[in-house]
Image (spheres, helix red, strand yellow):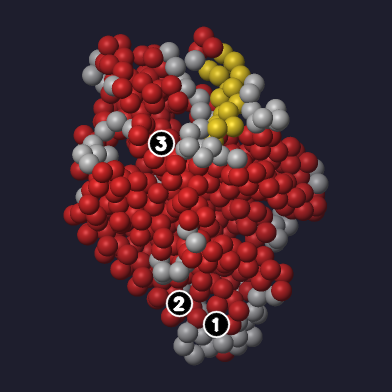
């Protein structure tokens, strides 16, 4: 097995660490949260170490390979590029945020925090795996802790929400599995790197057609369905509002901050490299669905009265921008200007994935704090004037809200700007219609600010507690990260751009 120069398999360690932490936390009772926090902190340190060591040429580095079942095309194959490393850092940061937000778990804390750590292990494994077999294992295994976290600690309708979440995602996974079984039958390989190389020369399509007939488009649709449910893409989104609103807020932070990114990551790592030519052929209907996701997601958010459902639909809207850019890119580049547009769009997608993960998780963290201070209330009309009794709370949540709105100077702006900079020359009609999503999102966010934080203070909220020092200290790094990336996006873009160039050079549309 080859790994880092000093022989340490850091990616395997990173994935195994939360599993070990989960086993310890399970039997630690009231100390479980502390053990989970220490585990997540070490995981963040390892993820940052990986980020610092990604290849500067955009290729996949820190490779770890070992034979597993060669006759079945299965090997243990891990690696990272700029995209993977950023997703590892995001997963580590959001998991730490979620654990910090979960200080009121009193029922079966050992099991709760063990499940959170197992979910983190599933995320790390999904992002680092380069062979379909164990990538799919991690993809599916991440579902199980998420299901139980919703089912056991969720709201009054948690049973139905958890089941809907599980069934929808499993149904999408069936499409993924069938498509890859067909690819394996045709090529004898499950290795993403090898299959991407075959696809870039057209050999993958030839092999599939020779062995199975003209089914390549159906395989592409199966793979797209699997990822469309996860992101989600309308009309495959109906599981999301129930799951996000019924899950405990710290779990919702994980669902929106990290698990939804697995779907976007799958589109970039698997769908476009292997099925780019087929996606280009159905580009128009896919763009229509992406635009619907952007615009309808925003309008649905505007119609909600529950704060968690407002931001659940807002998440659909924000991830719709990622899908808009991905499908807009699916066109052969005919010149340097087109290549620059594709690069801008892809940089925007990767930046938006990270920025949305941080911002959306922070918003649900603030909602958790509101619920703790109001005996579970979270209706948009339940409050008013909270800025007066809780100015620090209002100020810090304002940063997260304005980041979600896309205010220049905060992280939410940069990704959306790059996406629209790339999409306008590639699919100008889709871009123009999608701008309405931006406008409606702005109206939604400003409405939340107006109804929750401004106006006269109802008598019952006159003593609404402000953030205490511990909460300010926990939230300050997150808000600082939003400002830092908003002002210095090159901290991420400079490291990710070589990966973007490398990916685009190997995609065949």
What whole-number distance in Å separates the C-alpha atoms at marks 1 and 2? 10 Å
Residue 56 higher or lower than 393, as above or below:
above
Contact, CB < 8 Å: mark 2 with mark 3? no
Please name the residue that numbered disc 1 is placed on: 386
Residue 17 higher or lower than 35, as above or below:
above
Please name the residue that numbered disc 2 is placed on: 449
- The mark lying in front, picked from 1 and 3, is 3
State the residue at coordinates (30%, 57%).
Answer: 420
Asked whether the viewer can see residue 222, the reply is no
Q: From this viewpoint, which residue is outermost toward the top?
A: 71
Residue 301 higher or lower than 107, as above or below:
below
State the residue at coordinates (61%, 19%).
Answer: 66
Q: Position of residue 79 (x, y in %)?
A: 55, 31
State the residue at coordinates (74%, 41%).
Answer: 21
Quarter of the rendering containing residue 421: bottom left
Indicate left or right for 124 with 342 as reference. right
What whole-number distance in Å separates the C-alpha atoms at marks 2 and 3? 42 Å
Contact, CB < 8 Å: mark 1 with mark 3? no
Q: Position of residue 23 (x, y in %)?
A: 75, 38
Q: Position of residue 423 (x, y in %)?
A: 27, 52
């Amino acid at each position: 097995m080859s790994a880092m120069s000093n022989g340490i398999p850091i990616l395997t360690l990173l994935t195994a660490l939360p599993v070990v932490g989960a086993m310890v936390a399970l039997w630690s009772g009231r100390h479980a949260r502390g053990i989970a926090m220490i585990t997540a902190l070490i995981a963040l340190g390892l993820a940052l170490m990986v980020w610092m060591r990604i290849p500067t040429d955009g290729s996949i580095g820190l490779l770890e390979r070992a034979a597993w079942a060669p006759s079945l095309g299965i090997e243990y194959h891990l690696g990272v590029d700029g995209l993977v490393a950023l997703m590892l850092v995001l997963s580590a940061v959001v998991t730490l945020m979620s654990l910090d937000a979960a200080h009121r778990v009193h029922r079966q804390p050992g099991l709760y925090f063990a499940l959170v750590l197992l979910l983190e292990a599933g995320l790390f494994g999904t992002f680092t795996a380069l062979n379909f077999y164990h990538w799919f294992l991690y993809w599916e295994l991440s579902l199980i802790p998420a299901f139980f976290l919703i089912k056991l600690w969720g709201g009054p309708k948690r049973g139905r929400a958890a089941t809907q979440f599980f069934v929808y995602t499993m149904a999408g996974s069936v499409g993924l599995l069938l498509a890859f079984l067909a690819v394996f039958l045709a090529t004898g390989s499950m290795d993403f790197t090898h299959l991407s190389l075959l696809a870039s020369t057209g050999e993958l399509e030839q092999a599939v057609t020779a062995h199975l007939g003209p089914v390549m488009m159906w395989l592409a649709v199966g793979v797209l369905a699997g990822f469309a449910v996860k992101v989600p893409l309308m009309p495959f989104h109906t599981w999301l509002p129930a799951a996000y609103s019924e899950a405990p807020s710290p779990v919702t932070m994980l669902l929106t901050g990290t698990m939804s990114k697995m779907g976007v990551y799958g589109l970039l790592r698997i769908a476009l490299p292997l099925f780019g030519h087929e996606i280009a052929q159905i580009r128009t209907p896919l763009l229509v669905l992406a635009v619907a996701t952007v615009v309808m997601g925003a309008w649905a958010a505007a119609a909600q009265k529950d704060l968690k459902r407002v931001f659940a639909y807002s998440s659909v809207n924000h991830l719709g921008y990622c899908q808009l850019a991905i499908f807009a890119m699916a066109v052969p580049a005919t010149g340097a200007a087109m290549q620059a547009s594709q690069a801008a769009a892809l940089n925007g997608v990767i930046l938006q994935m990270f920025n949305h993960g941080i911002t959306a998780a922070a918003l649900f963290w603030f909602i958790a704090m509101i619920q703790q201070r109001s005996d579970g209330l979270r209706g948009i009309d339940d409050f008013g004037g909270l800025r007066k009794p809780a100015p620090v709370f209002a100020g810090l949540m304002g940063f997260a809200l304005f980041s979600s709105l896309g205010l220049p100077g905060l992280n939410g702006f940069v990704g959306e700007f790059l996406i629209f900079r790339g999409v306008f020359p590639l699919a100008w009609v889709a871009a123009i219609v999608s701008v309405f999503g931006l406008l409606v999102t702005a109206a939604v966010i400003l409405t939340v600010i107006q109804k929750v934080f401004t106006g006269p203070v109802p008598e019952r909220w006159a003593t609404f507690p402000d953030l205490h020092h511990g909460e300010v200290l926990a939230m300050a790094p997150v808000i600082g990260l939003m400002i830092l990336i908003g002002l210095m996006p090159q901290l991420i873009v400079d490291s990710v751009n070589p990966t973007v160039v490398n990916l685009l050079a190997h995609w065949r549309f």
